[in-house]
Image (cartoon, rainbow, N blue to C red):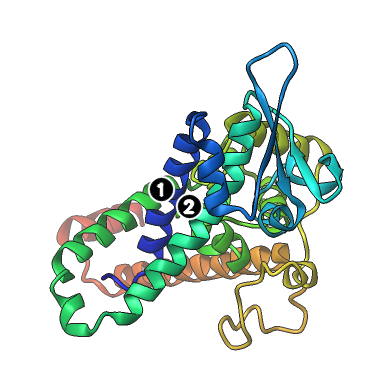
Amino acid sequence: ASFEDRLLTRWVEGEASRADQLFGMDGKNFDIIARTYLSDIRSEPVPGTTEVTYHVPLVDYLELCPKITGRYWRLVNRPVKAGWVRMDPDVGESSRQRTARLLKERVRTSLTADCASRIAKMDDAFASLFADPVDRILGLLSESVQAEMPMSAAVREDWPPCFESAVAELSQGINVNHTGRVFLAAMSRAMGHTPEVTISFFANAPDYSADTTTYQVNHIYERKYTPHGCAALKTGARCPVSFGDDRLCDQEWMTHPLKYLRAKQRRRYQEENQAEIQADESTAGTSQNRPIDVAESNELDDSS
């Protein structure tokens, strides 16, 4: 009833994450649940253990894995045989839990579509019944997002739109693609943020893992990755600006987010200096024009 994408995204992410956790714990009904969201599923017992290894259809995997980041999910790293992808256990998770992570993406898609369908049927009169609680929730969400976004190094107002967009989306639990994540970390390093600050940007990511994020961010810092330029960001669908949205981005020479940052910093520095000069001139003018009191007059006479 809010017609707010931010609220919808947060709610869907919360429900999908909860489903991911519950599915991964339900060994008894997992096959039935998986077939609800996948075209099929196969399982084979692991000899000498009580564990089971799951296989999912390649067509389902290809649809869902691009939405998940990490080395494990790249198809080249997964065993494939006769159109089936084997979901090996990894990073402390069983094969069932890894498969549940795939199901999470299908749950997310299903919930988003269902909500969109319901919202389309709502009229303004119905939505107005929820106006007050929705406004309160939106206020709390805005406060939460602001609190979760650390400020350091560059002033927030200087951030390029592409960097601002990536940080904001992750803070709201929206998935950011691989290009956007690498850019965010590399740009954050170039802006002077510590690795800890950069890692904190990812804390609300749908697939956040403290260990994995720390490793990947430290790798980018150690290798001193150069942030993507504007052309690469546009190719990677990570440029949020259309022509006319930002005059600085529209400049022909604007080819890299670091140029944007430096231009904003330079303008802010010039404006602050100009303000100081004007303030000094104003103070000096006031001092010259104000009448001299008796004490000052005597001091001037004595000094002469």
Quadrant where the C terminus is found in the figure: bottom left
Residues tagged 1 and 2 counted as in contact (Cβ below 8 A): yes
Between the C-alphas of marks 1 and 2, the distance is: 9 Å
**Which residue is painted at 42% across and 56% down in the image?**
12
Q: Which mark identifies residue 196?
A: none
Query: Which residue is identified by label 2?
Result: 173
The quarter of the displayed image where residue 80 is located: top right
- Describe residue 86's horizontal placement relative to residue 261 as left or right: right
Q: Nearer the viewer, residue 160 or 301?
A: 160
Mark 1 or 2, closer to the camera:
1
Q: Is residue 83 visible?
A: yes
Residue 153 sits above or below residue 218 on the image: below
**Which residue is painted at 59% across and 88% down in the image?**
244
The quarter of the displayed image where residue 8 is located: bottom left
- Describe residue 85's horizontal placement relative to residue 37 as left or right: right
- Judged from the image, the secondary structure of the residue bearing numbered disc 1 is helix
Residue type at mark 1? Gly
The quarter of the displayed image where residue 106 is located: bottom right
- Judged from the image, the secondary structure of the residue bearing numbered disc 2 is loop
Q: Nearer the viewer, residue 161 or 66?
A: 66
Residue type at mark 2? Gly
Residue 72 sits above or below residue 45 on the image: below
Q: Which mark identifies residue 14?
A: 1
Residue 247 sits above or below residue 71 on the image: below
Q: Position of residue 177 (x, y in %)?
A: 66, 57
